[in-house]
Amino acid sequence: MPHATTSRRKATSRRQNSEDIEDVHNSQVNGHVDDVSDEEQTRASRNVKKEKKGNGKQRAAPEEQDEDAAAVDEDEEDEDDLIDVSNLPDQPLRRVDAQKLNGIAEDWRNMRLQIGQRVDIFKEVGVAMADAGEESFETSENLQEIDTAMREFLDVDAEMEAHAQTLDDMYQRLGFQDKPVQRYENGLEERKNTYAGKTTRQKYARDERYKAFRAGVWEVHHLDDPMPPLTELIPREVGDDDDDDDELETGGVTQNYKCPLTLTFLVNPLTSKVCGHSFSADAIRAHGKPAHLPKKCPAAGCNKSFKLSDCVPDVKLDKRVKDYKRRHAEREENSDAEEVVD
């Protein structure tokens, strides 16, 4: 056996080396150092070093072999795990896989919801620009830039909804048919092309977020004048006609910051989740007693009913009320100063 032969060879070498060292040592002890040549001492020393080095290699060899074998096995496993995704066939979805389409669509909508919570940043920046002296979207490059950013945000929002709608459609009607990947890509492309083919008015004039953005900037310089319909502020394009304009929007946008109950400016406003009307906190709490019974909304023309628990604090509205009152005070001060100068 190879191991037995190696052991005998190692033992013989070890005995020879030991004898060489012993001969040198004995000669030195007996005072016969001169009888041992320098060449013999050097040869004995080299033999000892070779023995140590050889033993180290022999002991390490099995470990190195194991490591090499493990590395080879691991490489082979990695090669086996690789999947050529580009050559996978576009196979029909199984029923269990088709069920996941609905969940993915909800993921897209949840992402829209999370991102949409910060849409007010565009209005806040636009209002700050107007407060700093920017007059209008027609004359201010800064306002035009933030308007472009707002529209791009709405475009991305529409694309995310297109993903969700395409997945919904596949889940309801197409999920079990052939080539689901191709059907998804085709359905998404069709929706994106439909959106891209719309005019600027058709994309944004109906969007309440865009209306609020433009109205916030308008209000800075037109405190008591309602904003005209967006169809008057957005230039007409090919595809826009009079019927579409009337259908999009028929009146201007205005904001009433007074409480329907007190007829004074809102204080710590609470807004109804049922109908969207807002009231001063103390006034609606007094009106809403007993709290567990629903009552008709006190806003003029509203026929809906709600309980006091349906009214929630409206921090954003509270800020707008304070900004409106501040601008009114500044305008009155400027008006009084102009009268004094005259």
Image (spheres, rainbow, N blue to C red):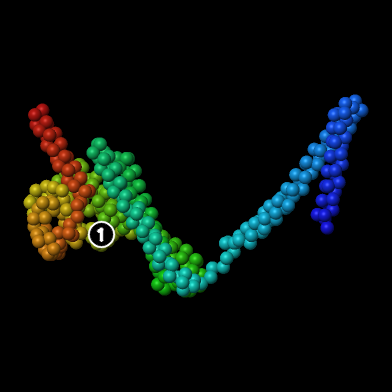
Residue 255, percent across and down?
Answer: 17, 50
Q: How far across and how far down the image is residue 122, in percent?
A: 30, 46
The N terminus lies in quadrant: bottom right
Q: State whether residue 7 is above or below residue 328.
A: below
Left or right: 38 in relation to 182: right
Which residue lies at the image location 54% right of the left edge and 68% below the top edge? 90
Q: Is residue 138 shown to the viewer in this render? A: no
Amino acid on which disc 1 is placed: Leu
Secondary element at tag 1: helix
x 12%, y 60%: residue: 291
Q: How many marks?
A: 1
Q: Residue at x 81, y 38 (%)?
A: 48
Query: From the viewer's perspective, is 329 left or right of 23?
Result: left
In this rendered view, identify the residue nearer to me: 288 or 156.
288
Residue 99's image quarter? bottom left
What residue is shown with label 1? 248
Name the side, left or right, on which 103 lies relative to 131.
right
Looking at the rendered image, the quarter that the C terminus falls into is: top left
Q: Position of residue 132 (x, y in %)?
A: 25, 36
Between 67 and 45, which is closer to the camera in this rendering?
45
Q: Position of residue 206 (x, y in %)?
A: 27, 57
Which residue lies at the image location 20% right of the left edge and 45% below the top edge? 319
Residue 143 versus residue 125: which sits nearer the camera?
Answer: 125
Residue 146 visible in the picture: yes
Outermost residue, right side:
35
Q: Residues within 10 Å of mark 1 (few under 14, many from 20)?
A: some
Q: Is residue 121 above or below residue 294?
A: above
